[in-house]
Amino acid sequence: MVTYIVRRLITAAFILLGASFVVYILTAISGDPLGELRALNTANRDQLIEARIDLLDLNTPAPIRYFKWLGGAAQCLVPFAGTCDLGRNVTGQPVTEALGLALVQTLSLVTAATVLAILIGVALGIVTALRQYSTLDYGVTFMAFLFFSLPIFWAAVLLKEYGAIGFNDFLRNPDIPWYTAAGIGIVAGLVLAVAAGGDLKRRLRLGAVGFGFITALLIVASVTRWFTTPGLGIVVILLAGVGLAFAITVLVSGLQNKKALYSGLTAVAIGIVMYFPIQGLLNVATPLMIFILAVVAVLVGVGVGWLWGGYDRGQGMRVGGITAFLVGGLIVLDRFMQAWPSYFNNGKIRGRPIATIGASTPNLEGDYWVTTLDSFTHLILPTIALILISLASYTRFTRSSMLEVMNMDYIRTARAKGATERSVVMRHAFRNALIPIATVVAFDIGALIGGAVITERVFSVQGMGTLFFDGLGHVDPNPVMGVFICTAVTALVFNLIADLAYSALDPRVRVK
Amino acid sequence: MTQPSQQNEILAERAAKLEEPLAGIEEIREAKGLSQGQIVRKRFFGHTGALVGLITFGLIFLLAFTSLGWAGIPGWWKYNHIDVAPLVNDGAPTLSLTSIGEHPFGQDRIGRDLFAMTMRGAQQSITVMFIIGLIAGLIGVVVGALSGYFRGWTEAVLMRITDIIIIVPALLLAAVVSQIANRRDSGSWFSGFATNYGIVVLGVFLGFVVWVGLARLVRGEFLSLREREFVDAARISGSSNARIIFKHILPNAIGVVIVNVTLTMSSAILLETSLSYLGVGVKSPDTSLGLLISQNQEAFSTRPWLFWWPGLFIVAICLCINFIGDGLRDAFDPRQKKFNAKKAADPGTRPASAPAAAIDFSKGA
């Protein structure tokens, strides 16, 4: 195992050397680094050219410059020495500094999108595999192909037009006429009827219920001006929490495990009791505090499950922990909604909250909730765009992986010995179907940092892609190399992790 | 994204195990007495999605190439993508249910015909798609076959080259190509050629980059196929290495090749349009679907048609290719048998008693 890892790392180092040389030379020959300066007509043109030649060391041939750069980059391998030198870009800023700033922007852009895409994609894949050749399956398959074929820059412009400008116009006067509410309700009811299993009668009933519920919800929201002053309130949190407790119990342990259900419900009750006392604490929230509260919530939930005990304590603890986390999330969401009016009426926002470009509103002042809301409203469109295009591959991959597992002998054995369908799907099939997905996820995380170049361009986010493009535009290899090293190292490391994870998860595969 | 080699091996292993029928899966009985090509063709044309995709793609292909003409042959459409015509109806599309009118897709701000521009863009995308598919397919098959068949040093060297190319960003290569092609002042034969056939140059260079995924898959396929008995038999009967590779192993791996070349082609369209959008692909005065969107995205509120038509053509072409690829995958995959979850779950029905008519390959996987 250790020899395998060491061998892989040494190979990776050589690959990195070769590829970085290729990238450096390609960037250097891609154009005339002084072209933009030569076109200038100002008096100090020659000085500027001299300064640029000096800054980029252009009198040295590119291959030799590469080795100079390599010497500086090699110092990055010395831990904690602080001598990391990846050169400077054309404005004289050290590349390491620029990279740090860009990395934060890119990561905040792609993290939420990736996590959501994986969760939704895997869930959709499982459902479509279980309902193979149903209307739902065909619908999702078609949507997956459609999203797969969408050019992101095109989808992004549509999102900007309808998601941001249209929604902002709507927020100015959030009035939903009854026919619009009924229309949305019909669509929701249809989706529910298609997604639900069972015979036609059951589907129609569910569809009708969905239609009534959504239409009523929209009309009530419109009448009570919910979109101007949103909020969940303790009653909605209670209802949603109880629903979540039941749903999680069904998935994790099955409703016949009463102790698990009770621990979930107890977690909801604790959350409701804590709702008012915690508001004062939330008013002075910081990111760290939210994180600690989340950990505390999970611990409390797990503790509740442990106290309920029962024949399978682990299941109860799991249900309690997950439910507590989600109820805590609901309370935080409620607090965000409470901050909405003050954000919405902020002088910098002027009632148009959903932003089309950038990563935050400049000079916005406000507490934790307002500033976080601000970054949410900036992230929402790029996140949706990224989810749309990456959802498809996860759905398709999970579906085929799940179908393959469902064909296995041991699934038939599990059914033959009388395991419940929930147990067969969640315990026997799902876990094994996750093995190949784990490797794909590892790959995608490795490709994340460099993978959002176009999204960054469309939404004017100053991330890695922008850095890369600026470097390329100025024929300046240093920032290009900085971005390349970051992306290549993550890609190689996650490739290795993917292989190791595969062999750890699947005992039939041994690394050698 | 590329797959690790171990995964290929384990999948190949599983494929071997799956050859015996399982619960809820019916064997192919309709396949008796047919050659592989006949089976594949039959299954492919039974796949509704693939068939619709193929027909739609054929129509788009004909429309794009006959309307403007290609390679000097004139087309039937009266405008081309460069000439300026007086604005009709302020440039709004004249397409209606009864007639196509003067400018069916509308005109841009200075009066160029959008139908002609979109058709030109579709030509470019389809051309670049075929070039990339051809070059990437050839290189990928040769590299994958050599490294999978000979193993040892050949494999080590070829696979390390593959690894290097995988992590060099395609964007950088495209930028370099477009920069070199744009240096018209240098007057070299290359820049002269690139001025006239920019899309061909772009396609060739992208083809030299995107073969890596295919090479890995072909290698995985060769690794498992070279251990089979028929390869031993061929070797004992005195076949040369080239004959074993091309006559014995490659026909068995052709499914993987064709399917993945198709999928590479669909991603090639998105790659070309993205690069043109970013300004490093096709350059004005020539046009491409990505470039049209990039030029017109600011005008969305005033002239939305300039934005809709090119985008719809990208999605349509890409969707067709994806459906064709999906149909091909189902047609080539011997494991693709109809799995019936209900039948497998229901202990009352024995799979063997199911009528053969229940076999249905028309449904996608």
Image (cartoon, helix red, strand yellow):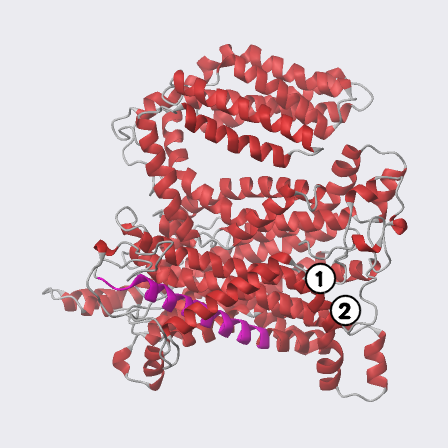
Horizontal and vertical percent for residue A502?
Answer: 71, 52
Secondary-structure class at tag 1? helix
Which contiguous range is marked in magenta? B111-138
Residue depicted at x 75% and y 16%: A308
Instruction: Give the residue drawn at x 71%, y 63%.
Output: B43
Instruction: Tally the numbered discs.
Output: 2
Tell me the residue that label 2 is attached to.
B224
Residue at image point 71% right, 76% down: B250
Dot 2 alpha-carbon crowd within 10 angstroms: few under 14, some 14 to 19, many 20 or more: some
**Quarter of the image where one finds residue A454:** bottom left
Amino acid type assigned to the residue bearing label 1 in the image = Asn
Instruction: Locate residue A22 relative to residue B259 in the image: left or right.
Output: left
Compared with B306, A476 (above or below) is below
Please tell me whether the stretch drawn in magenta is mainly helix, strand or loop.
helix
Answer whether residue B257 is visible to the viewer in this image. Answer: yes
The amino acid type found where label 2 is placed reads Ser
Q: Is residue A299 visible?
A: no
Q: CA distance from mark 1 to mark 2?
A: 9 Å
Residue B94 or A242: which is nearer the viewer?
B94
Q: In which quadrant of the rendered view does residue B226 lie?
A: bottom right
Q: Chain of mark 2?
A: B
Residue A305 location, x and y as percent? 71, 20
Which mark, by number, is residue B8?
1
Image quadrant holding the N terminus of chain A, namely bottom right
Image quarter in which the C terminus of chain A is found: bottom right
Q: Residues within 10 Å of mark 1 (few under 14, many from 20)?
A: some
